[in-house]
Each structure stands twice: as C-alpha cells, then as structure tokens.
Image: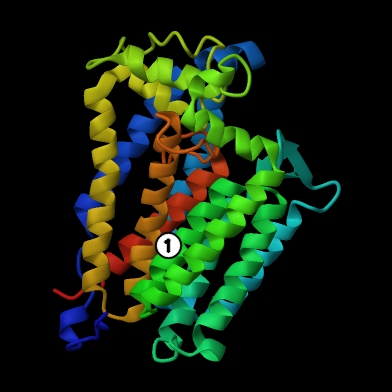
Amino acid sequence: MAIIKKSSKSSTARHEPDKQLIAVIFVVLIFGLVSLSSASAVVAYAKSGDAYYFFKHQLFGLGLGLAAFLYFSKVDYHVWKKYAFGFLLGSVLLLLLVFIPGLSAKWGQARSWINVFGFSLQPSEFVKLSFLLYLAAWLETRKEELHDYSRGIGPFVAILGIIAFLLLLQPDIGTLSIVAITSLIVYFVGGGKFKHIFIILLFGFLSFALMVQFKTYQLNRFKCLIDPGFSSQDICYQTNQSLIAVGSGGITGRGLGASRQKYMYLPEVSGDAIFAIIAEETGLIVSVLLVGSYIFIFYRGYLISRRAPDDFGRILAIGIVSWLSLQAIINIGGIINLIPMTGVPLPLVSYGGSAILAALAACGILVNISKQTRV
C-alpha cells in the first residue's frame, strides 16, 4: 500500500474540520439519548423508582464525553506520538486493574469492571483507544521493517498477544474481537503483508475454536446462532427476545415508547440490546437509517485517512472508524442473530459512561486529523 506523504506545507495547513462527520456524530448521540430514555424507562423505574435514572446517568457520561471530544479535537494529534509507549503501558495496566481485589467488579461471567468512588468503569473501553494510539505510532516508525520477523511481525504479534491474553482472562470476547480485528486492519494499512495477516487470523481462529470447546457458555452462543429454538427459555432467551422485538417492529415500528419487550422481557435493554428496542419502536426504516449513519461515519473517516498529512494520522483515522464500525456490526449482528452475541455496546447509543467517553475522545482525535488533511 502506498504511503501518503506531505506534498507541501500549504497543502496541509489547518482548515475547517469535517462538518459532515461532526453533524452525523451528534445526530446519532441525540437519537441515542431519545432511544435510551424510552428503552430504559421501565427497568429504571423498577430499579430506582425513577423512570429517567439511566437517562440522567447517561447525561453525566455524555458531559464528560463531550468535554473529551472538545479537548481532543483541539489538541494537535501529533502530540500523542510522544506518549506512544506510555499508552502501551497504560493499556496493560488498565486491563490488570480488573483483577485487583477491592477494585474489581464482576458482572455475569465477565470481570471487566472496576469500582472507583462509587462509579463503575470498564477499563477495556479505554484500551481500545490507548492501544490504537500506540499501534499507530509504532507502525509509522516500523513501516519499512514490517516484513522482518524480529522487527516487524514478531513484536506486533507479541504485543497484541499480551493484550489478547488479558482480555481473555476477564473474559471479554467482544472487546477482544474489536481490538484484534482493528489491530490487523491498521497493521495492513501501515504496510503489513496480507500473508502475515492471514496466518494470524488462522491461528486466532484455531485458538478460539479450541477455547470454545472448554467454555460451555461460549459454545452455547454458537448453538443459539445455529438454532435459537434449542433453549428458547434459557440459554437462547435473550436471542429469541431480541428477534421478537426486531420482528414486531415491522416497517415503521410500534411507535416511540410503545415497546413491549422492554417490560422485563428482554434483558439489557439500556445497553447491549438497545438496538432491538429501537427496531421495535421505530421500525425498519429508522433502523436502516441508523445503520447508514455508522456507514457514513466510516466513509468520512476513510476520506480523512486518505487525505491525512502523515502515516500516523492515516493509520489512526482508519483505526478509529474501523473500531466504531466493527463494534456497531458486532452489536447489531448479535441482536439479529447473524453472529453470536458478545455483549458489546452500540457506539454512541448504548448506556455506559466508559463507552461513550472513549468513543467521543476517539471522535475528537478524528476531527482534529480532519483539520489537517491535504486539500
């Protein structure tokens, strides 16, 4: 893949950011707040006596996210190259926090959260960004050596393996999938060989297939994918209820606030399963428009990557939009049973302060790159 370089100082002078990208991001954010307010009302009232409990908490996370968006959109993205190794260390430390007694908080099968001053944080959400920043800087410096096993592909596999191992220990297969695939995409964009990527993918697939044989709950997810009816009231309950919600929405939906599945039938209506409620209440047309919004964000990010003034910006831009797009695909694909459910939030929509903070910080960096693209 050809390396894009600066053609002249004037061609990469600062200019207006990508306003179309910003507009779509904020449309998705506003739509997400409205959807969350409706989807979470019943569960929130049952939990706290306040139908807007989750909505109010999301506003706090959104406020922090918007502050991060503004900050990262104004700070020159080249600054982050200086802290590349710090981002790698930070990624490892963040993933280790969930194993510290007193900090760790377990939810279901996963140990992916920590409690800090009464707030729950998911460190792996921030690792998506910190590890990407490290990889973008590392790939820029190693672009001529990626074919070499000792200087290129070897260290890349070793570093990715450490992050993957820590995510497997939690276990957080959804985040691992996002981090691993995004890493392979930026490795390829940074100049890596497709042959190396194929070998890594093959090894990863075989390792995952072996792991599934010893993890019953992971194997059950694949059984639900193949036949949702084999345990519709137990193992595949969430899959079946999600499909009922999506199917009952039809073309135009039941109407905003008129979901039936949110009345304690479908679990995680404010988080991983919010798309099912969106489809039920607003129907196929609005659901397709939401999917189209994610496609448009990827498209604008792709253009920003192509026009970035250097390799660091090019790799970072495509990495950010690949991460957000993959996460949307994995979330929606799980809801409509195209892929196994993995429990990842819908970007910029699902309830969760850590997720929205990390995503908006990444979008801020993307906007900053768009200010410096070649014109």
- Residue at 27% of width from left, 83% of height from top? 3
Indicate the position of residue 235 as horizontal and vertical percent values. Answer: 62, 24
Q: On the rendered structure, is 213 left or right of 354?
A: right
- Residue 25 x, y percent position in the rendering: 31, 45
- Relative to 169, 315 lies left or right: left
Is residue 67 visible to us here?
A: no
Return the residue nearer the eye: 85 or 198. 198
Label 1, on which residue? 72
Place residue 284 in its image quadrant. Answer: top left
Colour convention of the picture: rainbow
Secondary structure state at the residue bearing disc 1: helix
Q: Quadrant of residue 315?
A: bottom left
The quadrant the C terminus occupies is: bottom left
Q: Is residue 100 above or below residue 263?
A: below
Between residues 193 and 259, which one lies in front from this camera angle? Answer: 193
Q: Nearer the viewer, residue 181 or 119?
A: 181
Q: Is residue 312 left or right of residue 96?
A: left
Quarter of the image with the N terminus in it: bottom left
Is 313 located above or below residue 203 in the figure? below
Identity of the residue drawn at 45% across and 87% down: 142
Q: Which residue lies furthest to the right in this view?
A: 101
The percent coordinates of residue 336 (x first, y second) are 39, 29
Q: What residue type is labelled 1?
A: Phe
Place of residue 332 in the rendered image (x, y in percent of width and height, measured from the top left): 40, 35
Circle 1 Cα neighbour tier, 10 Å, few/some/many (<14 / 14–19 / ≥20)? many
Judging depth in this view, the residue of 180 and 287 nearest the camera is 180
Which residue is pictured at 26% across the width and 47% down the height?
295
Residue 325 shows up from this direction? yes
